[in-house]
Image (cartoon, rainbow, N blue to C red):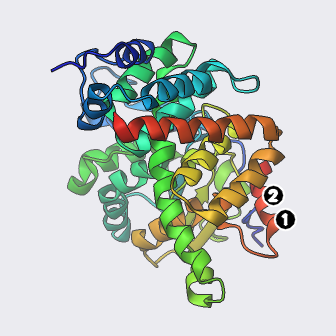
């Protein structure tokens, strides 16, 4: 039985090898890879969207990954680091990127959770095959999970929905101008944050 | 054609404004040797230099907000050099432009909502506007709020002024400092009217 880490929780600590965005133009062996940890977004005060898929080299995945990639600019406009992940190894990721036309131009890293430790901690491993469900996380600059969406293995995602939620999370009415009668305490709390 | 008038020229020099700068209103005042020129000059120098709660840098940054709000580039350019010479950074100066721009949205948008406080649609629909520069301002929250209050004062949004005034005080800013600030923005605005 999975125990999913949900909204309000700290995203688990991780440090994983990933295929870097520009892996296919790497000029030396080994440069295709980078180590990614929580600092990838927290160090620069950015948000993170991490999305998981079950297996490399399957049919639904490249379409979905390509649609995230097409929206890469939308995420960076929103100060958001985009990361794709599965339990495949970095070498499988790299082979898949080399193999599939839609994946050659990826602008975000593909994280390799080869030990499955992160997927396990997130509670998104499917019981039989121990592969990740199509989970999507929005994590704020403080490392707190603000949105989780988990689709079953065969159900693709809608990137516009992720952007809609991200916009809603990022557009707090922070200005004291938003003061309303009876809401002084809320404004006070926001002002003191 | 530059304005040949000692008071005008000394004010320009104090504010680091090009001495060849000219305007229709200043020409008129200089041509008749209006007594107002001396008042204006002394008022400007008072609000920039004779504060007990506002530092010189803070005074200049607030003055930049007034110039930004009225898009007066002649004054803004002069003030920027003075601010840089008084320990302001380019990031802090830049933030005043961001803040002034954002507050123009808020002063219009919220003022409208404030007129219709019983309207549930206007008041309960999320604005959906990004205000992330308010989160971690480079000038610090207290000063950022103070500058936001001043732009609201310039743009005459009553509820924005009242809510920011409360917020500024929560951040520990004294009423005396708020007083000096609003005196400053009023005077700098009067300068822009003729500049």
Residue A131, quarter of the rendered image: bottom right
Would residue A99 appear left or right of B195 to someone viewing this image?
Answer: left
Give how far across and how far down residue A36 sits, in percent: 55, 36
* Residue located at (56% from left, 69% from top): B110
Tag 2 secondary structure: helix
Q: CA distance from mark 2 to mark 1?
A: 5 Å
* Chain at tag 2: A
Q: Are marks 2 and 1 in contact (CB under 8 Å)?
A: yes
SS under mark 1: helix
- Mark number, residue A57: none
Residue A137 placement: quadrant: bottom right
Nearer-the-camera pick, B148 or B176? B176
**Residue sticking out furthest to the left:** B1
* Residue A188 badge: 2
| Label 1 sits on residue | A185
Q: Is residue A62 visible?
A: yes
Q: Residue at x 51, y 19 (%)?
A: B83
Residue B152 placement (x, y as % from top left):
57, 54
């Amino acid at each position: 039985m999975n125990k999913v880490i949900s909204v309000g929780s700290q995203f688990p600590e991780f440090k994983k090898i990933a295929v870097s965005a520009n892996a296919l133009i790497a000029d030396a062996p080994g440069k295709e890879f980078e180590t990614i940890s929580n600092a990838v977004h927290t160090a620069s005060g950015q948000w993170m969207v991490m999305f998981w898929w079950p297996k490399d080299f399957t049919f639904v995945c490249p379409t979905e990954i390509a649609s995230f990639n097409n929206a890469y600019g939308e995420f960076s406009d929103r100060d958001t680091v985009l990361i794709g992940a599965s339990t495949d190894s970095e070498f499988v990721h790299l082979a898949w990127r080399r193999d599939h036309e839609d994946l050659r131009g990826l602008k975000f890293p593909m994280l390799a959770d080869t030990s499955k430790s992160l997927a396990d901690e997130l509670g998104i491993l499917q019981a039989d095959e121990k592969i990740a469900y199509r989970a999507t996380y929005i994590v704020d600059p403080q490392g707190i999970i603000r949105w989780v969406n988990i689709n079953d293995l065969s159900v693709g995602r809608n990137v516009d929905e992720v952007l809609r939620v991200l916009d809603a999370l990022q557009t707090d009415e922070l200005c004291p101008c938003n003061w309303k009668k009876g809401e002084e305490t809320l404004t006070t709390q926001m002002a003191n944050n | 054609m530059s304005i040949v008038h000692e008071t005008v020229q000394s004010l320009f020099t104090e504010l680091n404004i090009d001495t060849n700068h000219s305007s229709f209103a200043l020409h008129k005042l200089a041509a008749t040797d209006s007594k107002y020129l001396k008042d204006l000059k002394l008022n400007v120098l008072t609000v920039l230099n004779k504060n007990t709660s506002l530092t010189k840098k803070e005074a200049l940054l607030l003055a930049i907000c007034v110039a930004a709000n009225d898009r007066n580039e002649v004054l803004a350019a002069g003030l920027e050099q003075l601010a840089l010479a008084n320990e302001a950074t380019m990031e802090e100066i830049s933030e005043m432009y961001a803040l002034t721009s954002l507050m123009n949205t808020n002063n219009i948008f919220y003022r409208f909502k404030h007129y219709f406080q019983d309207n549930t649609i206007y008041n309960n629909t999320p604005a959906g506007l990004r205000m992330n520069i308010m989160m971690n301002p480079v000038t610090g929250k207290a000063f950022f709020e103070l500058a936001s209050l001043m732009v609201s004062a310039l743009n005459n949004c009553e509820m924005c002024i009242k809510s920011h005034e409360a917020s500024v005080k929560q951040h520990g800013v004294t009423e005396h400092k708020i007083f000096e600030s609003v005196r400053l923005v009023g005077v700098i605005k009067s300068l822009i009217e003729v500049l």
